[in-house]
Image (cartoon, coloured by chain):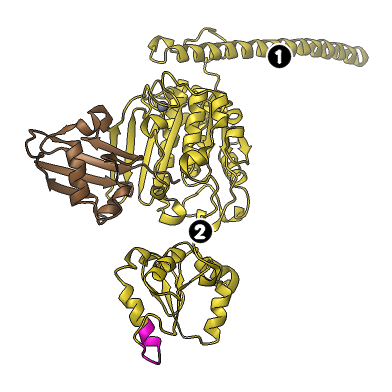
Amino acid sequence: MKLTLEFGGGLELLCDSVKIHHVSVEPQDGEQKLTMKHLLSWVRTNLIKERPEMFMKGDSVRPGVLVLVNDCDWELSGQLDTSLEDKDVVVFISTLHGG
Amino acid sequence: MESDGGSDAYEIRQKIETLKASKNDIERQISALDAQLQRINNNENNHIKTKEKVNSNDSSSSLTLENNGSFDFGHGLASDMIYRYSRQLLLPSFGVQGQANLLKSSVLVIGAGGLGSPALLYLAACGVGRIGIVDHDVVELNNLHRQIIHGEAYIGRSKVESAAAACRAINSTVEIVELKEAFRTTNALDIVRKYDIVIDATDNVPSRYMINDCCVVLGKPLISGAALGLEGQLTVYNYNGGPCYRCLFPTPPPTTACQRCADSGVLGVVPGVIGCLQALEAIKVASYVGEPLSGRMLLFDALAGRLRIVKIRGRSLQCEACGENEALTEEQFREIDYEIFTQTSLSTVPLKLNLLPVGSRISSKEYRERVVKGEVHVLVDVRPAHHYKIVSLPKSINIPLPSLEARLPEITSALVNKDDSKNASIDSNVSLYVICRRGNDSQRAVQYLHKMGFSSAKDIIGGLESWAHDVDPNFPTY
Ligand SMILES: [Zn+2]
């Protein structure tokens, strides 16, 4: 399934400074649907080039990272259990503190 | 007319006296009526404000001329106010009522930096009744590219004084409160209590949690903005049952994820855009106009030229600040140590590591002496390449810290090339020095080099900043 993944707020530095990635990810073997939980581990394996601890903590994102599925906080769609569909846009953004 | 000079003059004097007496009487009557009118105006305004607060969507709360015949438009705006703010009064969706609400409101701006500068200028210009400015910093030359409220004449002076003077120059009718102090749990409640709305224009994580919690405790809407590099973020917290900062970020981020403008850089106009939007959100909340950005977050990517507004979660029942069961009290707030909670210092003093034994370090002055004596050596600068391009010491080689491991052979060959005996070993007689901007990364690099067998490697204490401070005052700092 085709997905657009975007990294911002400095997270793009972990994947060769590329902000937008058009990727194709399939559900885990034996699963019907692609969940955010699986996508996160896919991202960690395939896109994150350095300091994975700056992206993930345990099996979720690290504190201070907002995850948006189609411009909507993933808290509203079930976090790790959110199931994704073809052409979905997933944004990972680190909160900023500067001023 | 028959005339007798003496009696004529007498009669005229009599008439003048009579007229003067009635003039005084009329003036007394006018003053009394003026005072009466003032009282009616005040009552009317309070009445409207209350109605607005109770139900801001009630269209029936529009104004009526209750005192026909008297000079009363019911909004309390004097004629110079009407003229000054006329272009805002002409907006049907804002109008005289929006302006009257704004004039009665008060906004606290915490931080007179990159975000606070444009926010303060617009808040003063648009006629917010009272504006508080909190900051304990002084203006520096490297602030001016983004902190546009300050000018060269104020370098070395208080940011609050500078910002207050700029606001007063734009609008002398606005009350400006100068708070030249650091915002801490000890003074936060007393300061915030006196304002309707708070703007977080600070630049660090502990302050953001502290300001959020203080606003939750006191029930104040919080206009939160942040900017770094070429990106910005904006949202309104703790407004009308919406989420607070802790609802979104219950756990502080790791300290390594918290970059500051002084380290990562920021394009001046980026916080400018976000600061303007913070002023806009404050104006909307203060005037009861429009839909404040609560439960939504604006993400600004300056390089891509893109603004996106996303939907964020609502208030969390489990939130440690605003949740149902654990509503934070003033006493609890005063007890929180935000530096411990976030593992980040509130002060802007840069970190000073001390990782190496004394024998593995030399001062910038000592390094200078060795160079003058002609000591054969290799100097490795471990800053990022774009830092190295700004300024560097002569004959240094740039190997950024993250690539040190991969580029060790370059150090070995540099040592070998300088060694007359052509002794192809990392234990050559050629000295190896490491420098960076402030002297932290250079220590990390030397630690690694020792581990890899470069046992004579030494770091230059305090980096290029100490070189500029102690050796060459003309060496540029950034
Ligand atoms: Zn909360």
Q: Compared to B236, does B427 lie above or below?
A: below
Q: Is residue B42 visible?
A: yes
The answer to whether A2 appears left or right of B256 in the picture is: left
- Residue depicted at x 49% and y 24%: B328
Q: Percent x, y for residue A51?
A: 30, 53
* Magenta stretch in the rendered image: B415-423
Question: Nearest the camera: B408 or A10?
Answer: B408
Identify the hue of chain B.
yellow
**Residue identified by numbered label 2:** B353
Question: Nearest the camera: B104 or B402?
Answer: B402
**Residue identified by numbered label 1:** B31
- Residue depicted at x 27% and y 30%: A75
Mark 2 is on which residue type? Leu
Looking at the rendered image, the disc whose residue lies closer to the viewer, 1 or 2, is 2
Q: Percent x, y for residue B6?
A: 93, 15
The residue tagged with tag 2: helix, strand or loop? loop
Quick one: label 2, few (<14), some, or many (20+) residues within 10 Å? few
Q: Percent x, y for residue B119?
A: 48, 39
The residue tagged with tag 1: helix, strand or loop? helix
